[in-house]
Amino acid sequence: WLRWITFSDPERVKPFAELGVVFMLFMIGLEFSLDRLWSMRRYVFGVGSIQVVASALAIMAGNVALDVEPPLALIIGLALALSSTAIVTQVLLDVRRFARPVGQVCIGVLLFQDLMVVPIVIIVEMLGGGEVAPTGAVLEAIAIAAAAIAGILLVGRYLTRPLLRIAARTGNRDLVIAIALFLAIGTAMLTAGAGLSPALGAFLAGLLLGESEYRHQLEVDVEPFKGLLLGLFFMAVGMSIDVIALLSQPLAYLAAVTALVAVKAVAVFVAARVMRIDAPVSIETALLLAGAGEFAFVVFAIASQSGLLDPAEA
């Protein structure tokens, strides 16, 4: 009888789990402003770009040294170069370091990683022999993504605040919450449709609402949704672990994970120091971003469908 009230398949709980990440990035966006985000451009485009390129190349080189074919090694490098937005931001919030310099650097790098989703997917499809024209597809994807972001920022800036004021004048607090939830999920779906990360869209929605006078009310009202759904996200991660596979070759998996964490930590540290970030902050950022992210599952699924990766390797 338990099958009627439980999720036995991780895939069935993923849609609900992803909403937790969406609401968490929405809450983070509420803490920011457009001016503050612009002031972080050194972290987003400086540290972020160096980290992604250095991590991908280092992981690729390690796989080539282990006799992995270069195209497959590149896919593995790109997939594992990105970190988990949900895990890193939750850790920062739990230890109350989100507002510290390390939090700003981490969020900047994570935002750049979200922007890299489209190029990585296009590269994987090209390597898989998909019907993707290299130059045209990349330019089209970038144009669509840029249009989606510009549309969200432009329309949201001039419509969000008047809409919330109209809702507030009705005296119905639930209406204000409903509009905020609609904006968070709607922008997440819009950026997902443009090929970007849904989390990026939710962050932009929070960024726009964070400039309104209703920011603190929304933080209080949306927090329960975020906590519940984010809990589902971490449960989904736990449900996806194949314990039998881990026990079959424990030393090999341990060595692979240790090598990945070490390589990415060094790459993040070097990227931060190149952009003249203090050594203590660089070290802490490196440790936080050293793990891989859930986007790797998406990349490996595409590679498997294209025949680049067999199920056992995936």
Image (cartoon, helix red, strand yellow):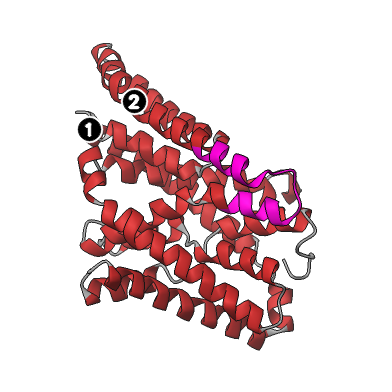
Q: Report how far apart the C-alphas of labels 1 and 2 lie in the structure.
A: 14 Å
From the image, tell me which residue sits under label 2.
154
Q: Quadrant of the C terminus?
A: bottom right
Q: Position of residue 150 (x, y in %)?
A: 39, 31
Instruction: Judge whether 42 appears above or below 221 on screen.
Output: below
- Name the residue: 65% across, 61% down: 240
Q: Position of residue 208 (x, y in %)?
A: 30, 32
Whichever of labels 1 and 2 marks the residue nearer the N terminus, that label is: 2
- In the picture, measured across the screen, residue 142 lies left or right of residue 132, that is left
Q: Is residue 134 magenta?
A: yes
Query: Which mark's residue is nearer the viewer, 1 or 2?
Result: 2
- In the picture, measured across the screen, residue 36 lies left or right of residue 132, that is left
Q: Secondary structure at mark 2?
A: helix
Q: Amino acid at mark 1?
A: Glu
Q: Nearer the viewer, residue 50 or 39?
A: 50
- Name the residue: 42% across, 48% down: 227
Instruction: Judge whether 121 appears above or below 248 on screen.
Output: above
